[in-house]
Each structure stands twice: as C-alpha cells, then as structure tokens.
Image (cartoon, rainbow, N blue to C red):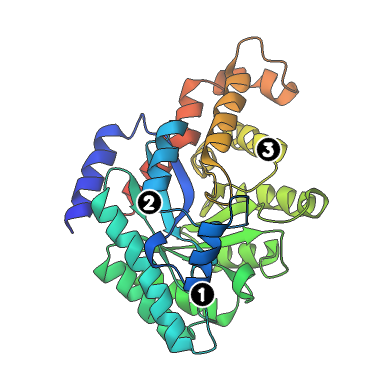
Amino acid sequence: MEYVNKQLAFLKANVNNLTIDADTHISDIENLNEKLLKKLHSTRNYYHGKPISAEELLWEMQASGVDMCLTWQNPAATVYKSNKKENFEALLKANTYIFESASKYPEKFIPAGWTDPKALETEDALKLAEICVNEFGFKIIKLNPAQNEFMLDSNDVVKVFEKIYSLGAIPAFHFAADTPYTPVSALEKLAINFAGKPLLAVHMGGGGSSYTEGEKIYDAARKIGLEYSNIKYIQSAKRDTHMESDFIRYQIAGEPYSKNIFCASDAPYGRQSWNFGGFKAMFKTLIHEDSHQDKRVEENKKVFNDEMQKNFLGRNFAEFYLGLH
C-alpha cells in the first residue's frame, strides 16, 4: 500500500528523533451519529470522550511537539445497536476513517484497527480484523474488554488474538483497573500462552479507576511486565507518579524491558499538550545532574540520560512498529 511505504520510509529516516503519541482516537466529525453530532455542536464545556477529527489532532500535535500518533477509532463516537450486523458496519466505518486519515497523512498517523467479539459476535470480529489487516494495511488491532464487558482471557478473545497473529499483525487491548474485565491474572495468562508474541497493553493498569483502586494493579502491572518481555505497555490515562516509577524501574532493568514502554496521551480523553509537556518535564528531572530523586536513581545515574528520554518519547515505539513489518 502506498501510504505504508511512505510511512515506513519516514520512520526509518527519523527513528532516532521522533516524538510519538502511542494512544490517540480520531473520528469522522462530519458524519457522526445525529445525537452525538448535536451534542458535539451544542456542548461548549467538557464531556467525556468528546470526538476530535484527524485535523484537530494535527493541530494539537503541532502545539505539543508531537511528530506522529498511533491512532484508532474513538469508541464514544461509534454507536452500537441491538443488531450486530449494524454494529459491524458502524465499526467498519470507524476503521475506514482511520485508514483514510493515515493515507492522507502518512507521516503523521500510524493507523490501528479495532474489533469487538461481543458487539459483532466472534466470526464478524475475525472478519473485521481481516479487513483491517489485509485491505487497510494495519499492523495493530485493538479490543476493549472493559467497555464492552468481556473477559480479557476469554475463549473469544483468544480466538481473535490467534487470528490477528495469523494475519501478521498484533493485538492491543485496554488493560486497566477501571473494571473487573482486565485483571492482571488474565494478562499474565495471555503472556504465557502467547510467549514470544507481542501483547500491547494500553494504559499499563491505568484507565478510569480511582487512585486507591489503581494502586494494586499499577504495582502488579509493573511487576509482570518485568517478568514477561512480550508485554508491551502504552503509558496513558495513569497517575503521573506511578508512570515515573515505571520509567525508573524499566530503565534500570535494561533491555529488553527498557524498550517496552511507550508514552501516550489517550487523546481526546487526555490532552496531548498536557501529557507530553509533563513527560518531557519528568524526564528532565531524571536526567538533570542535580536531581534529588530517590536512591534508585542516584545509584544508577549513568542510565538516565538524553537517550533514555528519546527512547520513551518515541524511539521505542518507532523501532517496535518497524519491527512488525
């Protein structure tokens, strides 16, 4: 595909210097569901998951110093109904917009697909994954067990994962403390069952949980990620102090673990400018020669440097994505 070749050439030429947001959601604003469209144009204040277009995200990227985004559909803008065939068409339409946006802006958007074994039923979920990979050229396909209420390690999910791998792509999935559908035990089971194959866990245990609810899963997510190197984490929608702990622990652990975390904003659920401004400031405190960080940092000062910052901000994901081709 033409956009894929342009994108890969750009990534290879700039792999060492890119800032990449590894979790963003865009929507075809002009063709939203009528109810959502009315809400979008009538709400001046905040509402959760407010859709943004590809062009709106491009503006935010420029303001935030972000070069590229991994992007997928926004589930808040894809309205499901009781008819599962209609759900298939709705999700196909949302994925098509991602494809069209990446084709239009290949040096800005890295596209990823989205499927759903519950809302579509398993066979159509597999069919949609096949369209996303074979017709759209996507190398990453996402599921959201939390929002759509199915267990992360269920038989249907395993079938979808197996299909995605067989197509030459990899699965991504919401992994957070906000529902009981994505427990750490399920991620560990998948990491063992799919040993040697990448699992892209979005939010690293964060998501919409409260701070107190999230504490246990934050710690457990960090622990199993340092035990199973096939677990790749997207850092978004998570408490900043825990993100810092993740970066410190993973950097000290060295490769391959220090290559397994990617910075992200979860736009529009999180502001890209806020998140990437925060990431950059955080890394500055870690690499500064007068840093007063805790003993783990002071004893391992040699591993905290500008190269570390480049890795987490974009090079890790660029190398990971290039490795999928």
Q: Which residue is mark 1?
A: 79
| Image position of 114 with respect to 241: above or below | below
Q: Residue at x 34, y 63 (%)?
A: 97
Residue at left offset 54%, top offset 63%: 173
Residue of label 2: 54
Q: Indicate left or right for 165 with 80 as reference.
A: left
Q: Farthest right residue?
A: 212
Mark toward the viewer: 2 or 3: 2
Whole-number angstrom distance, CA of label 2 to CA of label 3: 27 Å
Per the model, the C-alpha gap separating discs 1 and 2 is: 19 Å
The label shown at residue 240 is 3
Where disc 2 sits, the SS reads helix
Q: Amino acid at mark 3?
A: Asp
Residues at discs 1 and 2 in contact (Cβ within 8 Å): no
Q: Quadrant of the C terminus?
A: bottom left
Question: Hey, which residue is sitting farthest left in the picture?
Answer: 2
Whichever of labels 1 and 2 marks the residue nearer the N terminus, that label is: 2
Residue 92's place in the image compared with 24, above or below, is below
Q: Is residue 138 visible?
A: no
Residue 303 falls in image quadrant: top right
Is tag 1's residue or tag 3's residue first in the polypeptide sequence?
1
> Viewed as shown, does residue 36 lie left or right of 67?
right
Label 3 residue SS:
helix
Mark 1–mark 3 Cα distance, whole angstroms, equals: 32 Å
The answer to whether residue 183 of the structure is visible from this angle is: yes
Residue at disc 1, secondary structure: loop
Where residue 238 sits: x, y (%)? 66, 46
In the picture shown, does residue 166 fall above or below 307? below
Callout 2 amino acid: Ala
For label 2, count other residues whose C-alpha is less than 10 Å away and answer few (under 14), some (14-19) or many (20+).
Answer: many
Pick the residue in front: 263 or 301. 263
